[in-house]
Structure formats: structure tokens, C-alpha cells
Amino acid sequence: MKAANRGKGTKSKPDIIRLRERGTKKVHVFKAWKQVVAAPKNKPEWMPDKISKPFVKKEKIETIE
């Protein structure tokens, strides 16, 4: 989620995030983007009316040889 929020991807052109699983030879591949959405109704005072919400979708798991 943190990497998705820092990226510049959009829903039509998402960023590709690759995370290696520690201690194994697996790489998890995700598509990530963020959208500007309305803040929740029970938001604190300091939060703006519109916020960037990250979205992450797992695509596949690759193995390193």
C-alpha cells in the first residue's frame, strides 16, 4: 500500500510493483494505482475533503532460478 501511494500510476495505466519474498526465491508482482476520492464522513478535522486512496491488485508470483 505504501509503494502504491508513492507511485504515479492510474487505473488505466497502473504501476508494476515487484516485491521479493524474504528467504525464498519468489517475487510477488502487483499492479498499483491511486485515485482521488472523497474523505470518509467521520474524518478528523485536519484531513482534507479529498484524499489519495491506493489500490493494489496481485497479478502473479514469479520464481527466481
Image: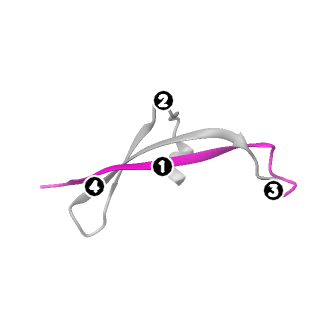
In the image, residue 24 lies in the stretch drawn in magenta: no
Q: Do the residues labelled 4 and 2 touch (CB within 8 Å)?
A: no
Residue that carries the numbered disc 1 in the rendered image:
56
Mark whose residue sits in front, 1 or 4: 1
Residue type (three-letter) at the residue carrying disc 3: Lys
Q: In which quadrant of the rendered view does residue 21 lie?
A: bottom left
Residue type (three-letter) at the residue carrying disc 1: Val
Whether 20 is drawn above or below 48: the answer is below
**Quadrant location of the C terminus?**
bottom left
Q: Tell me which segment is drawn in magenta.
A: 44-65
Residue type (three-letter) at the residue carrying disc 2: Ser
Question: Where residue 40 sits in the image (x, y, percent)?
Answer: 76, 52
Residue type (three-letter) at the residue carrying disc 4: Val
Q: Residue 27 carries which label?
A: 4
How many numbered markers are drawn? Answer: 4
Measure the C-alpha gap from mark 1 to mark 4: 15 Å
Q: Do the residues labelled 3 and 2 touch (CB within 8 Å)?
A: no
Residue that carries the numbered disc 2 in the rendered image:
12
Depth order, front residue of 65/33: 33
Residue that carries the numbered disc 3 in the rendered image:
43
Measure the C-alpha gap from mark 1 to mark 3: 23 Å
Relative horizontal placement of residue 37, taking residue 11 as reference (left or right): right
Whether 14 is drawn above or below 28: the answer is above
User: In terms of sequence position, does the residue under pointer 4 or pointer 2 come before the other?
Assistant: 2
User: In terms of sequence position, does the residue under pointer 1 or pointer 4 come before the other?
Assistant: 4
Give the residue at the far right of this rendering.
Answer: 45
